[in-house]
Amino acid sequence: MNTELNIAKDYTKNISDYANGAKVFLVYNPTFSFGTDLWNAYSGILGSHRLPSDYLSSLCKDYLTQIPFQPGEILLIAHSDGGTVSYDSVNSETLRRLAPKQIHFRGIAPASRPTKTMCATSSSYAHWLDPVPRMRCAISSCKYIGEAMQDEYGPMPKFNPFEAGKIKYLTGHPDAPLLFDHSFDSPTFEPDLRKEIRKFIQH
């Protein structure tokens, strides 16, 4: 939300740098306005069909099937609403059937987190005051919202917070914003993200 394409590209370069210059693919969900982006994020959690999720599924499928009998592994790194894009992609019929144990998810303040059964590993990091990682749990527990949206989107996807990928809540870095430490490039998240990327490369 409210992330311009050039900023998302900078985030992608950060990830590549953490991975010793490895090629990184960016799947970008365009921003419009805060209100529009917020609605887009909520509708995604409620099960709305979104093109970035389809594209991510296709990208993962192409990579996993390019070398028959020698499947690779994928590290999905998602920020904010990108967590929901990743959740819907990993939960798609294509990837659930193909290779759920070849995909690893790492989230930075993600609005959604794939469950333990959707992928090989799933873990995330967020500032302890950040409300965004609690969005899916809050919306799923609100019966009124679910019923109100059911006619448009069909039955709302069930979400059990006890089955979701683990999340580690962090105290803010001294140089990070005090009240809303949510940015992908926040110094609060950099050490853990670097560690997770290096661990994936070495495993």
Image (tube, rainbow, N blue to C red):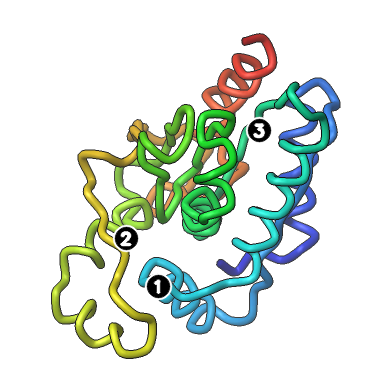
Q: Which residue is mark 3?
A: 74
Is residue 136 shown above or below 71?
A: below
- Work out whether mark 1 precedes mark 2 in sequence or the reverse, and give the earlier one: 1
Please rate how many residues cluster around mark 1, counting C-alpha atoms within 10 Å: few if below 14, some from 14 to 19, many from 20: some
> Which amino acid lies under the numbered mark 1 shown in the image of this protein?
Tyr
> Residue 42 got which mark?
1
Image point (72%, 36%), residue name? 64
Q: Is residue 96 left or right of residue 71?
A: left
Give the quadrant of residue 117: top left
| Marks 1,2: beta carbons within 8 A | yes
- Work out whether mark 2 precedes mark 3 in sequence or the reverse, and give the earlier one: 3
> Which amino acid lies under the numbered mark 3 shown in the image of this protein?
Ile
Q: Is residue 151 left or right of residue 20?
A: left
Q: Position of residue 81 (x, y in %)?
A: 50, 60
Image point (42%, 32%), residue name? 123
Which tag is nearer the camera, tag 1 or tag 3? 3
Distance from label 1 to label 2 (Cα)? 8 Å
Q: Is residue 156 left or right of residue 80?
A: left
Q: Which residue is mark 2?
A: 135
Q: Position of residue 5 (x, y in %)?
A: 76, 63
Q: Position of residue 178 (x, y in %)?
A: 40, 47
